[in-house]
Amino acid sequence: VQLVESGGGLVQPGGSLRLSCAASGFTFSSYAMRWYRQAPGKERELVAGITSAGGRTNYADSVKGRFTISRDNAKTTVYLQMNNLKPEDTAVYYCYATIGSWGQGTQVTVSS
């Protein structure tokens, strides 16, 4: 199983980023996917999740209305569109496949 995140970077408050997680090595369309994040000195927290077919999503209260999780099962990729970013969104973002595997993480820094 391999999960490779991309799309992180430095963005100003109010800006947007789209994270991608390219999956391989398992039947992607059979598993729910999640995005987590971990800020310095804090525990890893669930940001968003999506069911295997993409029909249902869930979000942390802190990102509802700003972040959107989606997936393309044909491309075996899950996305996290992040809008109206805030400094408190600064963290390493991790992709997680409910088969039990993590990506390596991608840094998102929101700062002016």
Image (cartoon, grey):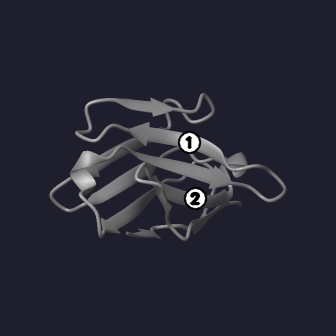
Closer to the chain start, of discs 2 and 1, is 1
- Name the mark on residue 47: 1
- For residue 39, above or below residue 51: below
At which x and y percent is residue 97? Answer: 42, 54
- Name the mark on residue 24: none
Q: Nearer the viewer, residue 81 or 112?
A: 81
Residue found farthest to the left: 74
At which x and y percent is residue 95? Answer: 48, 57
- Number of numbered labels in the structure image: 2
Quadrant (top left/top right/bottom left/bottom right) for the N terminus: bottom left
Answer left or right for 96 relative to 77: right
At which x and y percent is residue 57? Answer: 38, 32
**Residue positioned 59% across, 48% down in the render:** 85
Answer left or right for 103 relative to 44: left
- Name the mark on residue 93: 2
**Residue positioned 56% across, 42% down in the render:** 47
**Residue positioned 37% across, 54% down in the render:** 79
Q: Are marks 2 and 1 in contact (CB under 8 Å)?
A: yes
Few, some or many C-alpha atoms within 10 Å of disc 1 (few <14, some 14-19, many ≥20)?
A: many
Quadrant (top left/top right/bottom left/bottom right) for the C terminus: bottom right
At which x and y percent is residue 42? Answer: 80, 51
How far, Cα to Cα, is label 2 from label 1? 9 Å
**Which corner quadrant of the image does residue 55 belong to?**
top left
Per the image, label 2 sits on a secondary structure element best described as strand
**Which corner quadrant of the image does residue 26 belong to?**
bottom left
Q: Amino acid under label 1?
A: Val
**Residue positioned 52% across, 30% down in the render:** 64
Q: Nearer the viewer, residue 20 or 96?
A: 96
